[in-house]
Image (cartoon, helix red, strand yellow):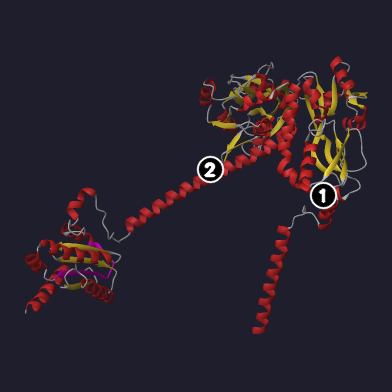
Amino acid sequence: MKRKKKKIVILLCVLVVLIAVIGGYFLLRDENRLSSSERLWITENANVVQNVYVLNDANLFGNLGNGVYYSFLNDFSEEYSLQFNPITVTGSESPDGLSLTVTNALLDLDVPFYEDHYVLVSKKNEVSIGLEDLASQKIGVLSTFNDVVKNYLGGSGALTLYSSSDELFNALDSGNVSYVIVPRMENMDTILEKNLWIVHHFSDLKRYFVLRDSNDSVLFRIMRKYFAKWSEDALETELYAQELALFQGALNVTDAMVDEMRKTTVTYGFMTNLPYEVYGDGEFGGILSEYVGAFAKFLNLDIEYKRYSNERRMLRDMNNGNISLYFNYNTSFTAGSIVDINLPLSYAIYAHESNPIVISSLTTLGDTPLYVEENSLLYQNLASINGLNLVTYKKDELSKVLKDENNLVVMDDQVGEYLRRSSLKKYHSRYIAELNVNYSLKSTGSETFNLLLAKYMNYIDQGTFIEKGIYSASVTESKGSFLSSLAKYALYSVILIILILLLIYRSSKRIRMQKKIRKEDKLKFIDQLTSLKNRNYLNESLSSWNKNTIYPQCVVMIDLNRVQEINDTLGYEEGDRQIKGAANSLIKTQLDNTDIIRTNGNEFIIYMVGYNQKQITSYIHKLNKDFKNLPYDYGACITYSMIDSDLKSVEDAINECVDDIKKQKGKDAR
């Protein structure tokens, strides 16, 4: 039996070690660590110039020897001391070999640097255009992109083909086409320089910037591993830097202008407005956090997010110039210049699930009341539509409106869909439409600041940012809810603990052995010579001691020998020195749950709780030993009296000790 147990123990130990080794391997394994053959290749090719094809007509990634690709290549060269010969190519070329290029479709071995998309560009800053709006429009496209765009549109719009970008954008300028469809990043310089506008982002019509080598060379594999680390450390910073350089060059914004903008912290004011703006756990979240946060990184700005609980406080700070940027959701705020952020306002009419109403158009509603939030941009635009019976409610009164299940509520579609998880859980949208209006930011910044803000907001893909923002709102709200719940339960716990402590204090029969002496009572209760408690303290404490129900208790009485003789022969100073010495010994050897009192010139009383007779005698033996070290080795007369029940009071014990002292003194005298 013992052998069997021993085998099981050994087997378990081996299993534990095996699990630890396997776990450590997977934990410490670095898939991007260079192999020995790759390191050897680097050593052998240190003096060999490597050819690499690099895109050179794509703005951020490669343009006239600058861009993300060139920065990556330079960093890689410095890391491994390798030499490169960049062979420049255009986006329409497909070089055979190691290349940093752009493509419409990924190959299996491609290493994606960045995922871009196509955009619809117009001369006018229009509200976002949908695919259904393109059917009757003339659209210009580069012939090289004809197949991919035509397949995507599926017959929407009449495509006119052009052989070069110059021809394409000239056609837009002259009005030969209403819109052009182009890859975003590769054409952003022209869009900015010609003051054109992106009116639709085709988020799912992709354009990829990649590291490619169909031959899967050793150098390609080394680059792929290096990019895994470089993308985490440098890619985002490099992208924002290249974006800013592009915008500055195209819009004639100098470095001095940018430096001036960076000197001032931008104060963004907001009230909770899910899913656009929310605050939780010290963080700002929501759709606007993604928009504003991206612009702050782009321009390297300091942003302070300031939350307000009501309109009045926010309006006061706005009028005092303490807010420099805010979301134009509430039309009662008018300070600042309007900056379009390419965020369209769509709305939905919500009805309770028990309401069978069908809404095919607004005209079918007649005089039916539509409840809409007051001072909202939605209300302002719906009010311009004739025939609607709009009833406004305050932002914090939505719950009151929803109590009547017959009420129809119209609200921003993003807000409504977000609230479907909470207050609108039993409501469904019965009618959805878009208004010909975009949301905006209001800014008190400079003209250059507002220009950069407007153009950057037009550049970013609002569809992607909205989705990221809704997720951000959900995460931030849950953090705030969790912390609020935690704070609430912590408060309840503190209150409960206090109540328990109060109950324990009130029900406890213990007495406090050490009384706190107030400053004003010090002279009354403290012996001035020894700093011990005095007879006044004894008299004050007797009643509380007698109420103590913890046993055993004991009174020890000490009477120093021949103190009067010392006073008479050597003077009172020597007598005081003998008394102080005894007091110091008592303090040094004091036990827990005891009180030491000097009752008169050479007499001390010690009141003790929780000590049995054996412990008391041991304590007295120690005192007798210590008293031999007093200035004068005359000793002391020590006696004690035990209290085992409430039949005997502390006064009775003191009297017994006094009698014993007298008897001992009498024997000594004889």
Element assignment for label 1: helix
The crowding category of the residue bearing disc 1, from other C-alpha atoms within 10 Å (few below 14, some 14 to 19, many at least 20), is many
Look at the image and say whether residue 416 sits in the magenta stretch: no
Residue drawn where x is 53% and y is 45% of the image: 485
First to last magenta residue range: 545-560
- Name the amino acid type tagged 1: Ile
Using the rendered image of the protein, determine whether residue 580 is visible from the camera's viewpoint.
yes
- Name the amino acid type tagged 2: Ser
Q: Give left or right: position of 340 versus 404.
A: right
Name, please, the residue furthest toward the front.
Answer: 47
Q: Is residue 578 above or below residue 177?
A: below
Q: For the residues marked 1 and 2, what is the alpha-carbon distance in whole angstroms?
A: 49 Å
Q: Which is more foreground, mark 1 or mark 2?
A: 1
Residue, disc 2: 484
Q: Give left or right: position of 201 versus 266.
A: right
Horizontal and vertical percent for residue 146? 92, 29
Residue, disc 1: 222
Horizontal and vertical percent for residue 594? 26, 64
Element assignment for label 2: helix
Report the front residue among 396 and 180.
180
Q: Is residue 70 above or below residue 327?
A: below
Residue drawn where x is 66% and y is 76% of the image: 9
N-terminal of the pair, mark 1 or mark 2, is: 1
Horizontal and vertical percent for residue 5? 65, 80
Look at the image and say whether residue 557 sits in the magenta stretch: yes
The crowding category of the residue bearing disc 2, from other C-alpha atoms within 10 Å (few below 14, some 14 to 19, many at least 20), is some
